[in-house]
Amino acid sequence: MRNRQSIQHFFIHLVLIIGTGVTILPFLWMVFTSFKTVGEAMAIPPTILPKAFNFDSYKNILDSLPFGRVYLNTIISTVATVIGQITFCTMAGYAFARLEFPGKNIIFIIILSVLMVPGQIFLVPQYMIILKMGLLDTIPALFLPNLFSAFGTFMMRQFFTSIPKELEEAAMLDGCNRFQTFGRIMVPLVKSGVVALVIFTAKFAWNDFMWPLIVNTSPKMMTLGPSLSTLQGQYTTNYPAQMAGAVMAVVPMVLLFFIFQKQFVEGVAHTGVKG
C-alpha cells in the first residue's frame, strides 16, 4: 500500500515539475533574449543562453521611448482602477449579498450578463462618452471606464455571502449602523477577497492594450502595452529590445503575485462558494 502511494506521489510530483517547467520556460526565454544581440536572437538553430550578457537593449528602450512617463501613466491608471474597483465592487457585492431592495435579483442577473458579452462591444460607446467629456488623450481616459466590473461585484458578493449573518446582527445590536457594520466588521472579514480583487484588477489594468491604444495617441500619454508595440517595425523587429521592454513591464506584476500569493489563492478558492 505504501509503495503504491509512493509511486503515485512520485508521478504526481513529476507531472507538476514538468508543468512548472513548461510554464517557466517562455519567461526564461524572454529574459535571456533581452540580453542577446539582434543576430543571436534571430540565429538558427536558436540558442537559449546569450554568449555574453548585453544590456544595450535596455539602454535602447530608455533612449527610444519616453519609458519613465509611460511607466508612470501605467502606474497611475492601474492604481486608480484598483481603488475604484475595490470601492464600488465591494459596496455593490455587499448590497447584493446582504441588503433587500426591489429588483435585486433582476439587477444582479443583468450585471452578470455583462460577463457573457465580449468587451470589444463596449469600446465604441465608451469612446463616445470619453469624447463628449473632452478627455481624449488624457490620463483619466485610461481608467474611467474600468472603475467598476461585473466580475469584481460577483466575486465580492460570494465572499460576503460566506460570512455568517450572526456577526452582522451582533454588530448592529451593539449600535453599529449599516455603514459602520460594512466598514468595520464585514470588509476586514473578506480581506483575502479584497486582495484577490486587487491582483486580478491590477493585472487587467497593467496589461490592458486595446482601450489605451484607442483613447490615447500621444507617445507620452500611452501605457506600456501600446508603447511597446511601437518597437515592432514593418520589415524588421528588434526582438531583444521588445523582450527587454516586456521584462521591465512584467516585473511589477510578478512581485505583486509573490507578495500576496497566499491571499490570491484563498480568493480564487472562495469565488466558488455558493451564496
Image (tube, grey):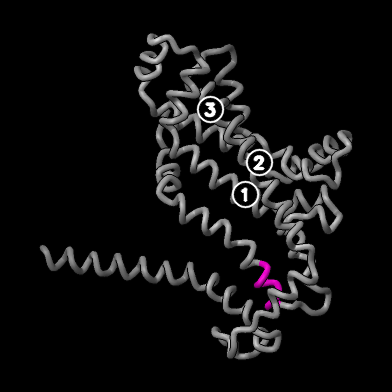
Q: Is the magenta stretch mostly helix, strand or loop?
A: helix
Question: Residue 90 placed where, x, y %?
Answer: 54, 30
Query: Can you see residue 254?
Result: yes
Q: Mark 2 points at which residue?
A: 81
Q: Which of 38 and 234 is in front in this view?
A: 38
Q: How crowded is mark 1: few (under 14 residues within 10 Å), some or many (20 or more)?
A: some
Q: Which of 105 and 72 is in front in this view?
A: 72
Image quarter (top left, top right, bottom left or bottom right) of the N terminus:
bottom left
Residue 93 numbered mark, or none: 3
Q: Name the residue under label 1.
A: 204
In this rendering, position of residue 1 left or right of residue 192: left
Separation of marks 2 and 3 at Cα, in angstroms: 17 Å
Separation of marks 2 and 1 at Cα, in angstroms: 9 Å
Q: Which mark is nearer the camera, 2 or 1?
A: 2
Question: Residue 128 placed where, x, y %?
Answer: 85, 37
Q: Is mark 3 on a helix, strand or loop?
A: helix
